Image (cartoon, helix red, strand yellow):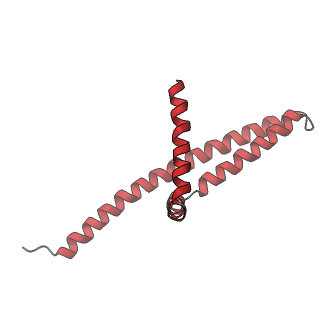
Amino acid sequence: MEVNSKTVDKAEETTAESKGSGKSTRFENIKNIIADKLHNVADVIGEKAADMDGQSGAAQCGKQASEWLDHSAEYIRQFDCKQADADVREYVRQSPGRSLLIAGTVGLIIGAIFRRR
């Protein structure tokens, strides 16, 4: 009995796609969980700020923090990891010297932080 090579190739592609989509689905689930938690915190802070005197500084700061957290939740929900990766790779291709300088600076800062601990 002879197995068609196209059938085997299709089966391998399907397996690879399902593994890839599993990672993507997991990442999407994590993104949604984080976004939901941020949105919940924003709601709680907004409610606490509404309970305070509307003109007090703490109420205004609470309202602003609530708005920022809500915007952050939406940003996380809409974030596309593949697009960000493509953007970073394109930037590195266009500016390799600046990219090395940035990477070196970040490495020195992280090294200094861990050295102090």
Q: Residue furthest right?
A: 55
Q: Is residue 66 left or right of residue 17?
A: right
Residue 19 image offset from top left, x and y in percent: 35, 57
Q: Residue furthest left?
A: 1
Q: Is residue 83 left or right of residue 64?
A: left
Residue 89 image offset from top left, x and y in percent: 49, 61
Res. 87 image quadrant: bottom right
Q: Residue furthest top?
A: 117
Identify which residue, 27 or 91, lies in the foreground. 91
The residue positioned 55% from the left and 43% from the top of the image is 106
24 versus 55 height, above or below = below
**Total tally of numbered discs in the picture:** 0
Res. 50 image quadrant: top right
Q: Is residue 54 left or right of residue 21?
A: right
Residue 59 image offset from top left, x and y in percent: 85, 36
The residue positioned 55% from the left and 31% from the top of the image is 113
Res. 47 image quadrant: top right
Q: Is residue 31 left or right of residue 48?
A: left
Location of the N terminus by quadrant is bottom left
The residue positioned 35% from the left and 60% from the top of the image is 18
